[in-house]
Image: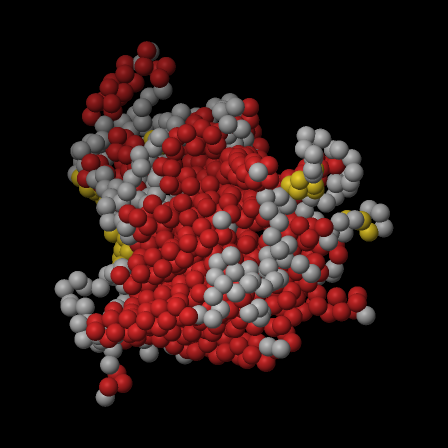
């Protein structure tokens, strides 16, 4: 019974954290972009505008919920829910920190992870694979041309980049020898020569290449600049969510940010050693706090890269995007796998 | 523990629904989906057997079935796009090129 | 507990499948089928095959059905016209085949020798599948890659406008 | 082999990147454009006709609203034609200030163009950088005439007021600062791989066709035709300034970008020369029938009072005739064809708007491109609907 309770509490905490991550991320993005563009960004609501996303959320909640007259009602309502659900799903298998008994609060130490499945990574990929439904159905059910174009674009885009996304993680699976995210993280524990962490980016010469490939594909999967074609506001007005308003729009908006956080968290787990870092874990009672801190710090630095890209780069064209995915990323990830295999075989022999 | 025959019943029902659907519907896309349903009915039986025998080969076969289904879907849907551009409809009764 | 889950998944799968063949709108059919695939993935998990369940969702629900949706959207297929009589020619056939299969089913149910057979090992790991796949089934595996390559080329040839 | 049906889609008049209320009816084959039909008239204000009911000075204030990104240039074009009708000589200081203002205006207009164009293609920061510098130019405008957009700074025979104290120094500070900023924009875009992919070879037009279609301004020069009215048909003393006419080679979106960036640098050069050689003297011609007398003379001089009264009540009455003086605006050849019947109001005012002529090439440029390219092309021809619809 207590186990069920712990799992329920964990679910609740992770879900809340993911949802609270969204306003933080919105604020973070606006602030960082603003400072990169030599302006201040939100300043009025709360100190340095931290409460601005909440104000936006309240505004969106009270806005008129508009249903386009020709829309396909059931699917129109279903789409944002699907988008949001699949976005949060990925967090169910990510380990956020080492085992802890919460400063002696619990008798048995619990892992900071909702559940450790031995096919953890596949769960994440299923979640990403389902993420496309929210967008496609939104575009189709609005019964309008711009959303349809956006939906068609994103279907093609997500289907193509998912392949490279999956392939870029294969070299990590080869190094770790497991699909369980917990074991993947634990395979990255320790330090080289006492100071370089044994993260997968440093463990093999191909680790960094795989990390770059993964991150590029992740940016494309989450439809962010410079791959934000499905919602390219200057071309397709707002892409698949053109016809959405009020809370349903807010759900797509949140799903996008949750997805960004998810991709960053997965990249951290797979390539940057998860919660491992100097001083994390260990037997001390506060080791888990440092681990959690490491994890959050890594995720935030990846999110910073997201924002940085958005502030810097122009957008690709649709056909260029597909060509980039198929002609560069796909072969590159295959080569990375091959190189990793060679490297591992050399290590073994 | 759930007896094997329960799984087999579900598998058979799904397969039957697939078969009935093929006789029942006329647009090619839905027919195609019925075929996928039949494949899945068979898959369920295979996995149930692989669990109860126990022999892992059942899962391997399912793995191949899914692979083949993916290839089949790619080609089948490409044919449908071509057909639609040619005929402006996907009605199986009115697609009778082979009848001479 | 397991029985409850089994019933939920099985009934969802069957219900979604029935709904699929009765939906007129292809998009709804497609969504019903996705739901059925999800329920099937649940059954696979109950059967101790989480790997196949994940593959089912990633490939079937995440790739193949998206492709179906994509094509339906691309061709902008609408619901079948309601006026046309629904192929009365084949209706007896459908009933006959369906009845036959259900009969067979009843037979299976009545004297299935495997009824209530004890379960095997609890859960198949990915490692076992991988080992089996790359030793005993290596030739089918390689052949399937050729098949997929052929399918890709075929699909490109068919869908391309100018070659 | 396979015939495909096309989709008709309506882009605008409320689309984020049609630069105003331009409406395009696109016929798409997938994402490829088969046909583009621009529909205009959503911003029709009837300025040309309204001018016939206003005195020349009143009419000039309406030209602010035509190409609202370069009101100084509209003012100048209108004033040059009016001055030709009236036959008044503009003093050198006024001419130099006019050049100064026009070149600042060209920079401001190009900045808006660069910002929105980059934003259309997805480069967001460039827009904010550009608007930051444009803001400074607008502040400079506000200082001389009290308005940022609807400037109405020029008068028949000169300017409405002389420059405030220390103004030239502030302009000089701005130009010094601005020249570094141009390098910054270029650093973000010119050799950016994504930017090159989106712009090189898109919306190409060769020199011959560009001329036949009536292209002018930076768009024409990007196709390799060194046609600049400031050089070929100088006005306001442009012949005294040393500057180059940047030309492109391929006539694609990228070349139009390069030409405009180079023009901003050339404009900065002209501004510097104007600052260095700013003549002293009167800011408005001393022509009692045409220009208002200085304010302080109204209390002491009877003639001044009478002239002031007549000009205010009756307006300036040019002799019958017609005039057309083209100028090189930020968008291309801009001119007002004006007919006077001897009364205080123009008999006919006809504008030659560069955006209108440039827009008509759009369907030709967009042929066979993708939707995303169309956005880039619309941005690159730099249209302002205010002067297209008039």
Residue B4 located left or right of residue D375 = right
| Residue reaching furthest to the top | D299
> Where residue D211 sits: x, y (%)?
35, 61
Between D136 and B9, the one lying in front of the other is: B9
Which part of the image, by quadrant, shows the N terminus of chain D? bottom left
Between D383 and C161, the one lying in front of the other is: C161
Whether residue C62 is visible to the viewer of this picture, yes or no, is: no
Q: Residue at x 27, y 27 (%)?
A: D289
Vertically, is C53 above or below A295?
A: below
Vertically, is A253 above or below D143?
A: below
> Where residue A91 sits: x, y (%)?
56, 45
Vertically, is D163 above or below B68?
A: above
Whether residue B53 is visible to the viewer of this picture, yes or no, is: yes
Which part of the image, by quadrant, shows the C terminus of chain D? top left
Residue D349 located left or right of residue D192 = left
Quarter of the view holding residue A331? bottom right
| Residue reaching furthest to the bottom | B100
> Where residue A273 sits: x, y (%)?
70, 49
> Where residue A330 sits: x, y (%)?
57, 66
Q: Residue at x 32, y 48 (%)?
A: A76
Q: Residue at x 64, y 52 (%)?
A: A181
Between A244 and A87, the one lying in front of the other is: A87
Q: Residue at x 78, y 38 (%)?
A: A283
Please give the count of numbered marks on the rendered protein.
0
């Amino acid at each position: 019974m207590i186990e069920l309770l712990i799992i329920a509490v964990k679910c609740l905490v992770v879900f809340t954290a993911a949802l609270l991550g969204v306003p933080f991320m919105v604020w973070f993005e606006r602030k960082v972009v603003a400072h990169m563009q030599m302006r201040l960004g939100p300043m009025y609501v709360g100190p340095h505008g931290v409460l601005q996303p909440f104000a936006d959320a309240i505004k969106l909640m009270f806005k008129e919920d508009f249903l386009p007259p020709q829309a396909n009602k059931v699917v129109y309502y279903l789409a944002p829910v699907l988008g949001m659900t699949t976005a949060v799903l990925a967090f169910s298998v990510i380990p956020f920190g080492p085992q802890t008994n919460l400063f002696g609060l619990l008798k048995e130490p619990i892992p900071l992870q909702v559940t450790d499945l031995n096919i953890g990574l596949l769960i994440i990929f299923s979640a990403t694979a389902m993420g496309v439904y929210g967008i496609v159905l939104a575009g189709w059910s609005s019964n309008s041309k711009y959303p349809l174009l956006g939906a068609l674009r994103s279907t093609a885009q997500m289907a193509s980049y998912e392949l490279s996304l999956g392939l870029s993680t294969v070299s990590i699976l080869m190094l770790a020898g497991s699909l369980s995210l917990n074991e993947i993280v634990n395979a990255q524990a320790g330090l080289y020569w006492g100071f370089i962490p044994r993260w997968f980016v440093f463990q093999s010469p191909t680790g960094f290449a795989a990390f770059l490939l993964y991150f590029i594909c992740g940016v494309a999967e989450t439809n962010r600049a410079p791959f934000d074609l499905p919602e390219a506001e200057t071309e397709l007005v707002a892409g698949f969510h053109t016809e959405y308003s009020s809370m349903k729009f807010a759900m797509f908006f949140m799903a996008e940010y949750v997805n960004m956080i998810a991709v960053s968290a997965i990249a951290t787990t797979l390539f940057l050693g998860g919660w491992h870092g100097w001083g994390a874990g260990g037997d001390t009672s506060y080791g888990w706090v440092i681990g959690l801190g490491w994890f959050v710090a890594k995720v935030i630095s990846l999110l910073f890269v997201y924002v940085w890209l958005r502030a810097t780069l122009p957008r690709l064209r649709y056909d260029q995007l597909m060509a980039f995915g198929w002609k560069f990323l796909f072969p590159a990830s295959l080569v990375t796998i091959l190189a990793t295999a060679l490297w591992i075989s050399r290590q073994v022999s | 523990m759930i007896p094997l025959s329960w799984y087999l019943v579900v598998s058979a029902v799904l397969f039957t629904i697939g078969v009935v659907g093929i006789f029942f519907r006329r647009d090619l896309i839905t027919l195609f989906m019925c075929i996928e349903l039949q494949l899945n009915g068979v898959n369920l039986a295979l996995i149930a057997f692989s669990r109860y025998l126990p022999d892992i080969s059942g899962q391997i076969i399912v793995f191949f079935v899914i692979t083949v289904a993916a290839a089949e879907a790619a080609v089948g849907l490409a044919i449908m796009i071509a057909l639609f551009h040619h005929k402006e409809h996907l009605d199986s009764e009115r697609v009778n090129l082979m009848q001479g | 507990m397991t029985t409850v889950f089994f019933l939920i998944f099985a009934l969802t799968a069957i219900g979604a499948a029935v709904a699929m063949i009765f939906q007129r709108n292809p998009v709804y059919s497609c969504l019903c089928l996705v739901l059925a695939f999800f329920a099937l993935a649940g059954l696979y998990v109950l059967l101790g095959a989480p790997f196949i369940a994940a593959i089912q969702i990633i490939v079937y629900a995440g790739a193949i059905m998206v492709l179906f949706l994509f094509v339906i959207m691309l061709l902008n297929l609408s619901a079948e016209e309601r006026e046309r009589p629904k192929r009365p020619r084949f209706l007896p056939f459908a009933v006959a085949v369906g009845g036959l299969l259900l009969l067979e089913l009843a037979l299976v149910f009545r004297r299935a020798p495997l009824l209530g057979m004890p379960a095997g090992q609890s859960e198949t790991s990915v490692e076992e599948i991988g080992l089996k796949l790359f030793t005993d089934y290596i030739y089918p595996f390689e052949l399937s890659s050729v098949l997929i390559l052929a399918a890709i080329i075929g699909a490109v040839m068919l869908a391309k406008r100018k070659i | 082999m396979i015939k495909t049906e096309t989709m008709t889609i309506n882009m605008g008049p409320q689309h984020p990147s049609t630069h105003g209320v331009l409406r395009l009816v696109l016929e798409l084959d997938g994402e490829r454009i088969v046909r583009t039909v621009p529909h205009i008239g959503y911003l029709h204000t009837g300025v040309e006709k309204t001018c016939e009911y206003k005195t020349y000075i009143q009419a000039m204030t309406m030209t602010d609203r035509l190409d609202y990104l370069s009101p100084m240039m509209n003012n100048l074009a209108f004033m040059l034609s009016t001055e030709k009708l009236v036959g008044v000589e503009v003093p050198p200081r006024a001419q130099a200030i006019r050049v100064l203002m026009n070149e600042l205006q060209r920079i401001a207009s190009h900045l808006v163009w660069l910002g929105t164009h980059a934003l259309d293609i997805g480069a967001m920061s460039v827009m904010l950088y550009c608007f930051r510098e444009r803001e400074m130019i607008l502040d400079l405008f506000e200082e001389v005439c009290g308005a940022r957009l609807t400037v109405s700074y020029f008068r028949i025979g000169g300017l409405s007021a002389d420059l405030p104290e220390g103004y030239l120094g502030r302009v000089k500070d701005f130009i010094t600062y601005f020249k570094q900023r141009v390098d910054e924009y270029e650093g973000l875009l010119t050799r950016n791989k994504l930017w090159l992919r989106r712009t090189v070879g898109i919306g190409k037009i060769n020199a011959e066709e560009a001329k036949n279609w009536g292209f002018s301004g930076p768009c024409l020069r990007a196709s390799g035709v060194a046609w600049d009215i400031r050089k070929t048909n100088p006005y306001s003393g442009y012949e005294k300034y040393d500057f180059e006419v940047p030309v492109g080679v391929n006539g694609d979106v990228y070349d139009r970008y390069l030409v405009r960036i180079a023009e901003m640098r050339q404009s900065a050069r002209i501004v510097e020369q104007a600052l260095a050689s700013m003549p002293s003297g009167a800011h408005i011609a001393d022509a009692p029938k045409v220009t208002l007398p200085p304010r302080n003379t109204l209390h002491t001089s009877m003639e001044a009072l009478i002239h002031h009264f007549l000009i205010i009540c009756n307006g300036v009455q040019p002799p019958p005739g017609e005039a057309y003086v083209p100028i090189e605006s930020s968008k291309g050849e801009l001119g007002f064809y004006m007919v006077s019947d001897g009364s205080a109001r123009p008999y006919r005012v006809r504008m030659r708007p560069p955006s209108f002529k440039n827009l008509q090439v759009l369907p030709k440029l967009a042929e066979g491109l993708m939707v995303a390219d169309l956005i880039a092309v619309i941005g690159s021809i730099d249209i302002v609907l205010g002067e297209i619809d008039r």
